[in-house]
Image (tube, rainbow, N blue to C red):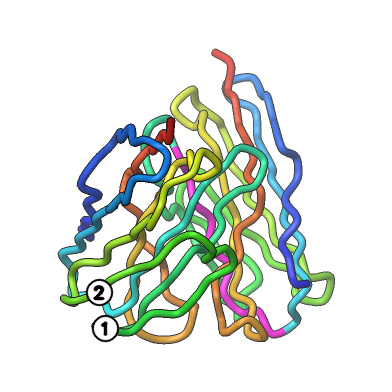
């Protein structure tokens, strides 16, 4: 089974802090994704990556950046956290190809910015 | 822009009844239609998917039907059980947006014993 592991289940940070969310997958998937999930808004794509050191903006990239130094690891960075970034963050991975590949999700990080 | 509309947003059924959730999409090039189940405190899990070359796919109590002409696809759960209670999401890729998966808003299903 594919396993996508997010380093923290719950995280509390302060406004203005730099925040790192880490995600690791064990199935040698080329594609990795970061989403945020908010009530009534479903899942919204922040950034994705098709290869090491490669990144593409999703629908809501403002205030975020990403890093993919190794194939199995994809990090989401909040450069200067703000209260409107309080949310559930989900990482996913899939095989290379078009979007016709199933995405496999981690269990999420619930981030609170105070 | 392109989107996926999912209905209903909440659904309550008695144990043993059937549940149907419907999604409508706008990109006629879409050809992959997954459904995800998200239990409390967990990430979404793929439960079934269908590609555009078939009209229906079944896996035990779960089935997905696709109507490409009308651009909608539906999740059917028969003989519902309390453990089916969860939030369900549909999704489909939009090729004029680089093939990204676009998710529906989710349906909260509650199965009452």
| Residue lying at 66% horizontally and 61% vertically, measured from the top left | B65
Q: Which residue is disc 2 drawn over?
A: A68
Dot 2: what SS? Answer: strand
| Residue lying at 41% horizontally and 68% vertically, measured from the top left | A102
Compute the Cα span from label 2 to label 1. Answer: 5 Å
Dot 1: what SS? Answer: loop
The one nearer the camera, B104 or A81, is A81
The one nearer the camera, B107 or A36, is A36
Q: Main secondary structure of the magenta part?
A: strand
The one nearer the camera, B34 or B5, is B5
Percent position of residue B31, x then y: 61, 79
Is B113 left, or right, of A108 in this rendering? Answer: right
Query: Pointer 2 and pointer 1: residues touching (CB < 8 Å)?
Result: yes
Chain bearing tag 2 is A
Task: Give the answer, above or below, for where B31 lies relative to B111.
Answer: below
Q: Which residue is disc 1 drawn over?
A: A53
> Is residue B112 magenta-colored?
no
Residue A73: mark in rendering: none
Percent position of residue A21, x then y: 29, 52
The one nearer the camera, A54 or A97, is A54
Percent position of residue B109, x then y: 60, 31
| Residue lying at 39% horizontally and 38% vertically, measured from the top left | A111
Quadrant in the rendering for residue B23: bottom right
Q: Which segment is the magenta one?
A: B29-38
Q: Residues within 10 Å of mark 1 (few under 14, many from 20)?
A: few
Percent position of residue B11, x then y: 69, 30
């Amino acid at each position: 089974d594919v396993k996508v592991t997010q380093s923290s289940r719950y995280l509390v940070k302060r406004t203005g802090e730099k925040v790192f969310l880490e995600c690791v997958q064990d199935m040698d998937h080329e594609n990795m994704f970061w989403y945020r999930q908010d009530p009534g808004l479903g899942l919204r794509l922040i950034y994705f990556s098709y290869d090491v050191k490669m990144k593409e903006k999703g629908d809501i990239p403002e205030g975020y950046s990403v890093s993919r130094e190794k194939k199995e690891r994809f990090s989401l960075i909040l450069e200067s956290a703000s209260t409107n970034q309080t949310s559930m963050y989900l990482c996913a991975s899939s095989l290379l190809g078009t979007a016709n590949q199933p995405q496999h999700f981690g269990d999420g990080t619930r981030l609170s910015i105070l | 822009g392109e989107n996926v509309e999912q209905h209903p947003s909440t659904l309550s059924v008695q144990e043993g009844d059937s549940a149907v959730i419907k999604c409508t999409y706008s990109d006629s090039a879409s050809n992959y239609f997954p459904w995800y189940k998200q239990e409390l405190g967990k990430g979404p899990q793929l439960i079934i998917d269908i590609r555009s070359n078939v009209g229906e796919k079944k896996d035990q109590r779960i089935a997905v039907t696709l109507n490409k002409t009308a651009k909608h696809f539906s999740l059917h759960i028969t003989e519902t059980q309390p453990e089916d209670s969860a939030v369900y999401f549909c999704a489909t890729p939009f090729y004029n947006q680089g093939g990204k998966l676009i998710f529906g808003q989710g349906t909260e299903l509650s199965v009452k014993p």
